[in-house]
Image: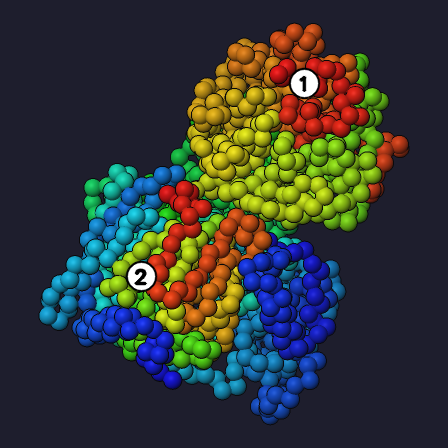
Amino acid sequence: MRTLVKHTKPIKWGQIGMRRILPMIIASLILTSALIPAGVIQSTKAFIPIPQAKNNDGKVFDTLSSNISTNNTDANKSLTSSSIHDITIEEQVLPDGEPAYKMLRHLINNSLDVTGNYSNIATIPGPAIVINEGDTVHVSIKHLDGNITQEDFIAPHPGTFVYQDDKLGDRGLYGVVIVNPHHQMTVALVDGKITTIPLSEIDKDILLFMVGSTFWGLEIAKNGTQTPLWTNPVLVAQENQKVRFHIVGIGPSSNPSGHSHTFHLHAHRWVDQGTNNIIDVKEIHPGTSHVFVIDSGDGVGPGDWQFHCHVFAHMEAGMMSTFKVLPANSTSGANKTVVQTSIPGASPYHNFAAFSVSDEPGKWFRNLKGDISGTGSESLAIINKSGTVNFMMDATNGVHTVSSIIYPKNANNMPFSQMMAYKGGAIVKLEDPGLYVFACSLHPFMLAAVIVDDPATKGLDLGAELTLVNGDTIPTNSELALRLLRTLFIVTSTSNWQDYSNQTKPWHVTYPDVDVRIVNDTVVNVKNVLEKTYGQNQTLTPLSNPVTPAVGEIWIDTQFEKTSGKTKPGTATAINGTTWKVSKKVSLPQIEMNNPHNMWTDRNQDLIYQTMWFDNRTSVFNRTSGELIKDIQVGDDPSHVMTGTKTDKLYVALNGEDGVTVLSPNPDFEPKKFILLQSPASPSTHPHGHWMSADDRYMVTPDALTGTTTIYDMLQDKIIGKVKTGVSPVAVGMLPDGSKSYVADFFDSSISVIDTANATLLKKINLLENYDPISGNKTGPMGFLPIQTPVSPDGQYMVTANTGGTITVLDTETDKVVKELPCDPGCHGVNFGAKKGGGYYAYVSSTFSNEVIVVDGDPNNDGDPIDAKVAGKVSLVASASTKTDDTISGLEGTGGQGVLAIPNVYDGWVQNLPSYWKGLLTDAQQNPSGL
Amino acid sequence: MTIGLVIANAVSFGSIGNAIAQSNQKTEQRSHPKNHEIQMGVKELSDDRIAYKINKYILRDLVDNSTTDITSNYDNHIPIPGPTIVANEGDKIEITLINEMGWGYPSVHTHGAHYRIASDGTLKDLNKVSDQAASPSQPYTFEWDAGNGTAGSWPFHDHTLGRNVFGKSMDGLETVGLFSSIIINPANGKVDALIDGIPTKVNVKDIDKDFILFVNDDVFWGSEIDYTKNGKHTQLGINPTLTAANNSIVRFNIQSIGNEFHNFEMNNVHWLKPGTNTQINSHLIGPLANHVFTIKADSNATYFDNSKINLLAGMKGNFVVADNNGKSSMNPERDANVI
């Protein structure tokens, strides 16, 4: 599990001398530990605070300049030999959209021009400024906006200091100042012994910046010449050469704890700076550097020695390369002064695409070059074959994966994925032409598409056949391939979402007007084909209120709706079940509610429990007033929350971890327990939408990453079994008596039926049984990519929301799908509420529209859902009478996810309702299982 | 004050006798470098986990060629973490890895020790030389050299068993159980320790127990080596209670594997930050870093991961100092979940 980090405002390091701050940090850490009674741990401790350059003071060199103001009388300040450096650097934008620094001029003591040492282009990392202890530096920075700023500092003490832009410093505007010690000596591990050697014996300096899940390199030759090594370079040295490594952590500043790494170089050891400890792995935190000198090949000889980050997911995400140690005599004459230059990796200047991973609706994977297709989507990139794609999770508070879900059949380096969600990034070389789609395994609407083109052929290459994440392979001219392509443009372009606030305006989906090459070397126009297949400018089915009112109100997480008081998206929307108007919108600007995903309520129906899926918190707010009551750190990516019927405790599934956090009931909401839903050291499960039995006996969790579903026995406090279900199980429904559980297997488009108590698979229902993926012909109900799937409170039927835009209804007696009803793109959330006078409504939300569809699953109330129908369609957009806690500023009513009807009428919960709510229900509704 | 005196003053007569006998034996072992000839199996556990186990462990004296079979020192009861190898600087280690799963290509990649590229434990795709892994039909032998400067406690783990085809994968499935450690004692026979609040050099032969704690994403996995019982290895499972005789010298070998960073902390106990005289009682550790310290066991303590959620999950254990050298034990509440 991840160490949780408190969200606190960063201290303005630049305003206080570092030398005064560090003792304060140490003192506070000691005090914190001292105040904790033995065996009791009061609070979450953040990572050791690290002075980062990121303090929004507008300065780039603040890790150094903050030292100027300190009152020290170090000898180095009075050194007569210290030099004055006049430096001008310039910000530029590289071809992939990343910003970078270029050295324009470096003049020493007004006479010696060393500009020629630097690369003549802008580089990532930026130029390494190498100076001596005590030197004075004046830097001019030419910014992208034309402004020029000036910073001055005196090199306070030896070390490698990060410089970094406040705004774009996570992305490329960073580098280091290397301050060599006055005595020009350094510690090295030579022939296995800790030794001090003159800097003049260093054969080369290698800089490796650990950013996201990519190494960005720079080499400084003995003569001072700097060579950019770009991404994951192959480092080269000869045996016995002394190489000084500078390993640097970068960003992101958006995340309070940043991304931490562990650097490992195979078969080499070094001295942990400032100690006599010999190590071969070092923790690298953002804004810090780790410097050491190795004796190349000492005791191990030549070889292609891997270096990598040892955070497991970062290894999987491609954070690795090679240190090539050549035999000492590989050059004739064994001239040790001949230095082999390292081999640069992929560069943003050539065949390279960069995506930023963010919490921003539609732009979850944002190509830094923006919208290149004219569709409004910023999630598409085009590169040529053997190009490189780099991902950086620099604008998200959540944990994610970068997983290939579609790729050309037999493509090299595919599939690409990670076994667990993480903070970082990813880098992958796409060698073979065709269409590649990447997604987060936890948030599968986060999509990035990369077309890898062979420039020698006509049209952009989509490839002949595509392999899907579940292993199926389909030809690119199949209806399923078209359906997926269309989905991509709808999901990632907010202007392509359905907007019910103006029903007179038809639904227009903008497709790229571009020729692509598909199977059999056929070249087709994407726009023409998609418009011909799916039509264009469709009239949306008008909104209509259900004739029979509902009891109470209906809450929908409008996960993408934006408000002006916060930078993260999402509101919770309440609909009055009598008027069918939006009565309340809660966005909780004071805590930056971030992608609110799913809700539940307390016994009294007074509170709303709200998970924040792209964060690590669950919030409690007053249902009537919208007032925040508590914001609780529960663990990464909390997805769903339910209460136990016997205890009213909260069970929060952590989609970014491997279990469920249990919170004490109203009024404390204290984390009391974490239930690990797998054996230690087994593959990560990452549960999403659990369900709990009415008798509080079983909790069934769909393990999104392992394709299993876990049955947890609350009474025995143990896992009683794991059932192999399908690819990416995402949500669970359960019969009122708990006997059968239904699991929606997202990527398999199937429902797995489980005998709960025996933890066995009873049946697998293929929701694509009536669909021909080649022709697109349909012969019966169909559900593409199912998500939420609750069983009606009376246990008679189940309603499933399918991302592909359908609602399927299953008869729980026969476990057969009996009906398909229309839904919107990204059909997602379902829950049941009471219909006035008896029966139930299922409320169905859709991610890429702004209405909720009201389904009456059994209008004639005979227990047979064959007559299931859409009873109404209700807007999620606020009106003038809607109570809000912030100003709605965009994407109104969109992102329909979790649904919660008040009162909560599921069997087991309905019996706990206060008499007021019971009084509004029929006898049958008060006792749905009839027991 | 010397360490010998500390022990003599503090422990019972029986323990002294034991300690002397043990010291003599260890001194003898140290006098000649050894070749560690190890046959190590890889077997499948429940819940998609995999583990190393010792099939045979012969110590061969590199001078007089005499051999000692120490296989029985190992307990394969709970095979996570894998068996710890204890060597001296100057020793050589030869591990023949046998794939007993019938599938996959596991390997051993070690940290710290010297090895040639053919013993990197990676696949050809990466090392450009060979596929260094045990196939179901073909064991692979890894050769390590505990050369100068390799002293320390280092993790070793799989580095090949990805989900791709043989010859292509680079990332190991090290997180699902294939991890263990090698302790290389320094040639000079001395390690840093904090004794009675004073940074001290202690003789390796005076260490009574080595505790190995692997910080995994959700739990601590423990094992111990008891030198007062002929170097008996005991697997302790998850979040174990560690037990030491009062005033005995114990070494904590903290290892880390997985995806997460953990703030390892012990209340009531301070130790030396490795390679310094700085006294600490917590340390932020990231995957595959190690953190080693030696202390005198003189007070009960709790070790834990200082993050609320991990603590809620029970990521903690006790360090119990007993009058008699009690045996460390598994946390009984968690036994059922171990394997």
Q: CA distance from mark 2 to mark 1?
A: 61 Å
On the image, which quarter does residue A80 sit in?
bottom right
Query: Image height check: is A655 above or below A163?
Result: above
User: Which x, y percent locates residue A185?
Assistant: 45, 83
Q: Chain of mark 1?
A: A
Query: Does residue B22 sit above or below A40 in this rendering?
Result: below
Q: Image check: B159 left or right of B102?
A: right
- List x then y, in percent, for residue A799: 62, 19
Q: Specify the subunit that label 2 lies on.
A: B
Out of A808 and A446, give the one closest to the viewer: A808
Indicate the position of residue A143 as horizontal and vertical percent values: 70, 63
Q: In this picture, is A390 found above or below B62? A: above
Dot 2: what SS? strand
Q: Residue at x 62, y 73 (%)?
A: A27
Residue that label 1 marks? A927
Is A22 or A839 nearer to us in this picture?
A: A839
Q: Find out whether the residues at labels 2 and 1 contact each other: C-beta distance under 8 Å.
A: no
